[in-house]
């Protein structure tokens, strides 16, 4: 499947996100371990040790020379002053806050894709939106869509600025959803529910809700309306929340994360 992209390498591929993406690509069958190269300063890739045949390289120049497509999974701070010999190569990035202009300075390539993914890629459950530079070919964009489809859901965007918002919303997993689950666990405990029961109950709630929302055609807002129209116990809670500041608080938090993404690199 990965023939459109040729030999694929992950720079920073031993980190949390890079190793999750490599795992998802292998587990989905998109790439065999031998088709992937990982550049690791330590030469070790413990998170990927279960995949014999994965090429672990330590010299960045040799790594770049051996790849047709490189996925950059470095910390944003590691890109300061970074220059990579990747002219004329397809360069993909999942790095927060590193813009297409920044990727051009780093790589010297005109074939650039800026994306945002998440560690859910290891389970092939990531959401990966991406934007492509004008210098990409149709084959580049087709291969990019195939690669990101192998690790979850994906959309090609036209507005690069939206990626900072997705860095906030869908980059961290469980991320903000863990915050909401923790708020419910704390509420349950405050009502006298034993902590381990509260933990199990709310984990099961979010597990069930996630699966049901993924499979059900009704959008989340539609479920809220249905429960309010049902006029039962849940309606009372939802109406109290709708009358309160919770939506604004959620939006303010996500906006703060997006603002941090814009300035992080
Ligand atoms: N961890 C997450 O949940 C998410 C991370 N991201 C983005 O993914 C990128 C990587 O983040 P993480 O995987 O969390 O970081 P990490 O710190 O877990 O992994 C970074 C990897 O890059 C390697 N590295 C650092 N500098 C290097 C260099 N100069 N040459 C070669 N390798 C180098 C490190 O050894 C490490 O293996 C960041 O830009 C982050 O914003 C995006 C969405 C979610
Ligand atoms: O929190 C972070 O900086 C990284 C980027 C998006 C999710 N995790």
Image (spheres, rainbow, N blue to C red):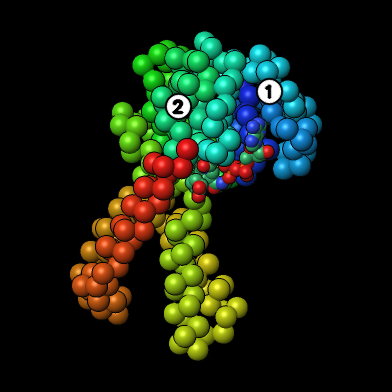
* Residue 24 in view (yes/no): no
Q: For numbered disc 1, what is the local secondary structure?
A: helix
Q: First in sequence: mark 2 or mark 1?
A: 1
Q: Nearer the viewer, residue 137 or 135?
A: 135
- Kindly identify the residue that appears in the image at 62 percent across and 29 percent down: 10
Q: Which mark is residue 102?
A: 2
Kindly tell me whether residue 258 is visible in this rendering.
Answer: yes
**Which numbered circle lies on residue 194?**
none
Given residues 105 and 95, the one toward you in this image is 105
Q: Which residue is mark 1?
A: 60
Q: Is residue 233 left or right of residue 86?
A: left
Q: Quadrant of residue 79?
A: top right
Residue 231 location (% of width, % of height): 22, 76
* Residue at horizontal 31 percent and vertical 28 percent from the top: 158
Image height check: is 64 above or below 31? above
Depicted 183 relative to depicted 103: above or below: below
226 relative position to 157: left or right? left
Q: Nearer the viewer, residue 66 or 148?
A: 66
| Quadrant location, the N terminus | top right
Q: Dot 1, crowdedness within 10 Å: few (<14), some or many (≥20)?
A: some
Disc 2 beta carbon < 8 A from ligand 1?
no
Residue 133 position, x and y percent, is 39, 20
Q: Locate residue 23: give its quadrant.
A: top right
As helix, strand or loop, the secondary structure at mark 2 comes to: helix
Vertical order, 174 against 243 (above or below): above
- Residue 122, image x, y percentages: 60, 43
Residue drawn where x is 36% and y is 47% of the image: 259
Q: Residue furthest bottom?
A: 192
Q: Relative to 16, say whether 175 is above or below.
A: below
Disc 1 C-beta below 8 A from ligand 1: yes
**Residue 177 x, y percent position in the rendering:** 45, 60
């Amino acid at each position: 499947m990965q023939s459109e992209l040729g030999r694929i390498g992950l720079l920073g591929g031993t980190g949390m996100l890079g190793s999750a993406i490599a795992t998802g690509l292998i587990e989905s069958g998109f790439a065999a371990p031998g088709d992937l190269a990982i550049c690791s300063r330590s030469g070790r890739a413990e998170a990927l040790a279960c995949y014999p045949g994965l090429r672990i390289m330590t010299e960045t120049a040799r790594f770049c020379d051996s790849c047709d497509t490189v996925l950059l999974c470095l910390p944003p701070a590691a890109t300061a002053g970074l220059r990579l010999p990747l002219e004329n190569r397809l360069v993909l990035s999942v790095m927060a806050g590193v813009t297409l202009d920044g990727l051009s300075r780093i790589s010297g390539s005109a074939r650039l894709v800026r994306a945002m993914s998440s560690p859910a890629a290891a389970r092939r459950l990531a959401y990966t939106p991406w934007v492509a530079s004008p210098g990409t070919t149709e084959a580049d964009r087709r291969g990019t869509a195939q690669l990101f489809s192998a690790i979850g859901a994906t959309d090609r965007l036209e507005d690069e600025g939206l990626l900072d918002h997705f860095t906030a919303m869908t980059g961290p997993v469980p991320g903000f959803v863990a915050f909401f689950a923790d708020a419910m666990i704390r509420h349950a405990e405050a009502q006298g529910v034993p902590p381990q029961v509260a933990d199990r109950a709310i984990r099961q709630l979010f597990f069930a809700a996630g699966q049901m929302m993924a499979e059900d055609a009704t959008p989340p807002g539609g479920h809220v309306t249905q429960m309010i129209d049902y006029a039962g116990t849940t309606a009372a809670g939802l109406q109290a929340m709708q009358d309160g500041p919770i939506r604004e608080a959620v939006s303010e938090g996500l906006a703060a994360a997006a603002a941090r993404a814009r300035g992080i690199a």
